[in-house]
Amino acid sequence: MYAKEMTGVYYNTCAIIDADGRLLGKCRKNHIPHLPDFWELDQPALAVANGYFIATINRVGIEAPWNTGRFYGSSYICNPKVEIIAKGSENKDETIIADVDLDMI
C-alpha cells in the first residue's frame, strides 16, 4: 500500500494480517522512488547481498485523480547473480513470468 503519514511523509507499506483478519502489524519503508531505473540499481544489489530472487513491480502511465507523475513500469525479475531474467515494458500493463532455479539460493 502507498501510505501517507502526513504531508510530505509517504511510505511503501505492507500489512501483516492473521488468518482471522486481525492486523498483526505493518512493515514500511520510507523511500518511495521517483527515479527512472531505481529497481535496476538498488533491488538487484539486495538480491546479490542476500542471495535471493527479487521480483519488482511498478505501475505504468498516469493515474487520475492524483496525476502525480508518470509511473515508469519496467517490472522485472532478478536472480541472485544480478541477472534480470524477465522484464516488462515501460508503457503497458502486463504480467511477467520467469522460471527460477532455486538451487541458486
Image: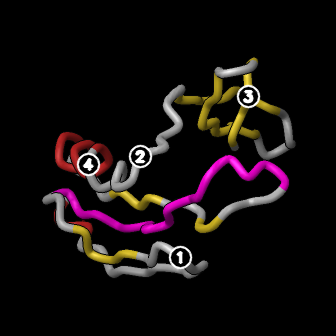
Q: Which mark is residue 35?
A: 2
Given residues 20 and 47, the one toward you in this image is: 47
Q: Are marks 2 and 4 in contact (CB under 8 Å)?
A: no
Q: Secondary structure at mark 4?
A: loop
Place of residue 95 in the rendered image (x, y in percent of width and height, measured from the top left): 54, 80
Drawn side of residue 37 relative to residue 74, left or right: left
Q: Earlier in the sequence, mark 2 or mark 4?
A: 2
Q: Which mark is residue 41?
A: 4
Q: Looking at the picture, does residue 4 appear above or below residue 92? A: above
Q: Separation of disc 1 and disc 3 at Cα?
A: 26 Å
Place of residue 102 in the rendered image (x, y in percent of width and height, measured from the top left): 26, 67
Query: Residue at coordinates 50% horizontally, 66% vertically from top-left?
Result: 73
Query: Residue at coordinates 49% horizontally, 31% vertically from top-left?
Result: 31
Badge 1: residue crowd in 10 Å (few <14, some 14–19, many ≥20): some
Q: Earlier in the sequence, mark 1 or mark 3?
A: 3
Label 1 amino acid?
A: Asn
Tag 3 residue: 4
Q: Looking at the picture, does residue 25 appear above or below residue 95? A: above
Q: Secondary structure at mark 3?
A: strand
Label 4 amino acid?
A: Leu
Label 3 amino acid?
A: Lys
Q: Which marked residue is nearer to the observer: mark 1 or mark 4? A: 1
Place of residue 105 in the rendered image (x, y in percent of width and height, measured from the top left): 21, 57
Q: Separation of disc 3 and disc 4 at Cα?
A: 25 Å
Tag 1 residue: 91
